[in-house]
Image (cartoon, rainbow, N blue to C red):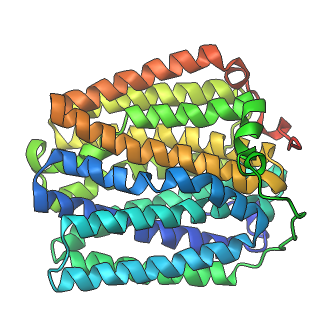
Amino acid sequence: MIDPALCSLPGLPSLIVGRIFSQLSASTMTIAIGWQVYELTHDVASLGYLGLAQFLPMVPLTFVAGHVADRFNRRSIVLICQVCEILATAILAFGAAFHLLTTGAIYTFAAFYGVLRSFEMPCQQAFLPAIAPPALLPRAQATLSSLFMTSSIVGPSLGGLLYGIGPVVCYALSTVGFTVAFAGTFSLRLLHTVPAKEPITFASVFAGLSFLNRRRDLLGAITLDLFAVLLGGATAMLPVYADGILHVGPIGLGLLRAAPALGALLMSWGLSRYPLKGRTGLIMFMAVVMFGIATIVFGASHTVWLSIVALMVLGASDVVSVVIRSSLIQLATPDSMRGRVSAVNTLFIGSSNQLGEFESGMLGTAIGPEAAVIAGGIGTILVAAIWARFFPRLWTLDRLEDIFPEEP
């Protein structure tokens, strides 16, 4: 149920269609390539390499992508990326249908997808502030997160169920979903202001980092999420848990993948109806601590229902951090800098997700998947304690409504 106050926002339906179907397709595709790689190799480390393949292209491209997002039409950039995603998943479906896919081919696709996301995500993140006024932005962010998590539930569940028929079905569904996302983005009408001509210099490309260095609360929020998810990357181990520990197969893997999104959906729905009123920084830190505790419980669990509950709590606590961080970044960043700041955010979040998968895969190979997940949860709690000490402005953050853009 969308908050009535948001229903009058022009462009919001198109934004929702573009973002939600993009995530639906990506999550369906992700579970398919993860399971297929593990099926081909039966190697825990291969799951880590898959995450690394998506992350590596983001490192050299992120700052360039942010500069591009601030100089050119962001909607056009997203449309180009989505056309490429349609073609790439169609090729995956063709390869799966004729048994042509190898681990190398899947890694290559993952790297190409990482390139596309490097350009697409900074632009997508800048759409919402162009639609929602500052007073409604936190509520709009929570609502979008709620719908985003709904697609994150449906995608893995469909991926797990349909993988039993064959991976080609998952890839074909992703192709259709990316096509619908393209249609939503194409119908989105935003006022495109031509930016002032700015020479491409080292300083202008890396201006997003300079801005974050001045805003310690933003830097703390982004890096807190980076290291928390980097260490607590339990989701990378889900194929191993589904196959060798919980013994639930592809369908169970889909349920495990959907559990964090279900918890996040419930929490984001609550945040959209009952937005945070104060002590926002403290709430963010407590959410990260709960994320670590849930990771530890999941790592130690050998019971399906307990694992699902732990993953739901993990997802619920994560979305609290996501909503606060996203709202803080969008409220505090001027439009002329949103592409570059969003690009840094994309790199850090991509680092936490993809490098977290790589770290979990390597550590899981060295000490076992259960010990790796538990150690990651402990590390997440320690990070929260350290960041509370070094980023006092974030710790004492009160009301999001009091945040205003700071010109560079």
Between 224 and 257, the one nearer to me in the picture: 224
Between 405 and 277, the one nearer to me in the picture: 405
Quadrant position of the N terminus in the picture: bottom right
| Residue furthest top as drawn | 389
- Relative image position of residue 141 (x, y in whole percent): 66, 53
- Relative image position of residue 297 (x, y in whole percent): 28, 29
- Relative image position of residue 358 (x, y in whole percent): 32, 43
- Relative image position of residue 393 (x, y in whole percent): 73, 22
Residue 368 visible: no
Q: Is residue 168 shown left or right of residue 334?
A: left
Q: Residue at x 78, y 65 (%)?
A: 71
Q: Residue at x 39, y 62 (%)?
A: 111
Q: Residue at x 53, y 68 (%)?
A: 20
Q: Is residue 219 shown left or right of residue 234?
A: right
Between 101 and 274, the one nearer to me in the picture: 101
Above or below: residue 178 compared with residue 32: below
Q: Is residue 229 shown left or right of residue 49?
A: right
Residue 408 visible: yes
Q: Is residue 94 shown left or right of residue 89?
A: left
Quadrant position of the C terminus in the picture: top right
Above or below: residue 151 compared with residue 394: below
Q: Residue at x 24, y 47 (%)?
A: 238
Above or below: residue 171 compared with residue 258: below
